[in-house]
Amino acid sequence: MNQKGYIKWIISIVLLVGALAFIYTKSQESLPGDLIYPVKEAKEGIGLAMNELNYEGRASRYMEHSFERFDEAMKLIELKRDEKDIKEALEKLSESQKRSLDNFERARGYGAYIVPQMEKFEEELTQQQEVLFELLFQVSPSLYDSIKSVLQKTEESIETVRYLKAR
């Protein structure tokens, strides 16, 4: 291969790496339904895999994911995006809450001191609960049941956090 061939390969690789880095960075701002949202989910999966045996770390990661899912759902509602995407975001919010609680419970079972994280989670869940309650009266009837379900699961999560803190 001559020098021009090497230069073309190097330019191609640099452009490819730059495009991948751009997608990776922009995926953080993506919402359910966006083309690059799966990249965001893959990044989160990698973060969880790095904490596979650390329940405290996994609980904190899932807690942060639940905060992000809440923000995504609110943004989708604000932008009046497709209801399918909004319902997906709400389901993912509930799932992240549940997984965070499961891992907090495991960490607690292993004697980890996680009360500060649980207090932060309880505070955030309480704020989410207030916003979700207000939304019940503002959304379309087709979203009402989804928001009501997440609201009930959020209440259950708050009760579970309080129980875990008291143990």
Image (cartoon, rainbow, N blue to C red):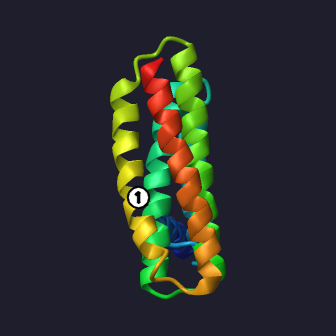
Going 56% across and 45% down the picture, which residue do you hit?
156
Going 41% across and 58% down the picture, which residue do you hit?
128
Give the residue number, with chain letter if any, for mark 1: 128
Give the residue type at disc 1: Gln
Front residue (pair 58, 35) = 58
The part of the image, by quadrant, that contains residue 117 is top left
Front residue (pair 162, 61) = 162
The part of the image, by quadrant, that contains residue 36 is bottom right
- Would residue 7 be visible to someone looking at this image? no
Going 59% across and 76% down the picture, which residue do you hit?
144
Location of the N terminus (image quadrant): bottom right
Going 56% across and 87% down the picture, which residue do you hit?
140
Answer left or right for 79 relative to 120: right
Answer left or right for 153 relative to 135: right
Q: Is residue 41 above or below residue 135?
A: above
Q: Residue 58 placed where, x, y %?
A: 53, 34
Front residue (pair 34, 74) = 74
Task: Give SS at disc 1.
Answer: helix
Single out the residue that lies furthest toward the front.
137
Q: Is residue 14 above or below residue 65?
A: below
Q: Residue 26 placed where, x, y %?
A: 44, 70
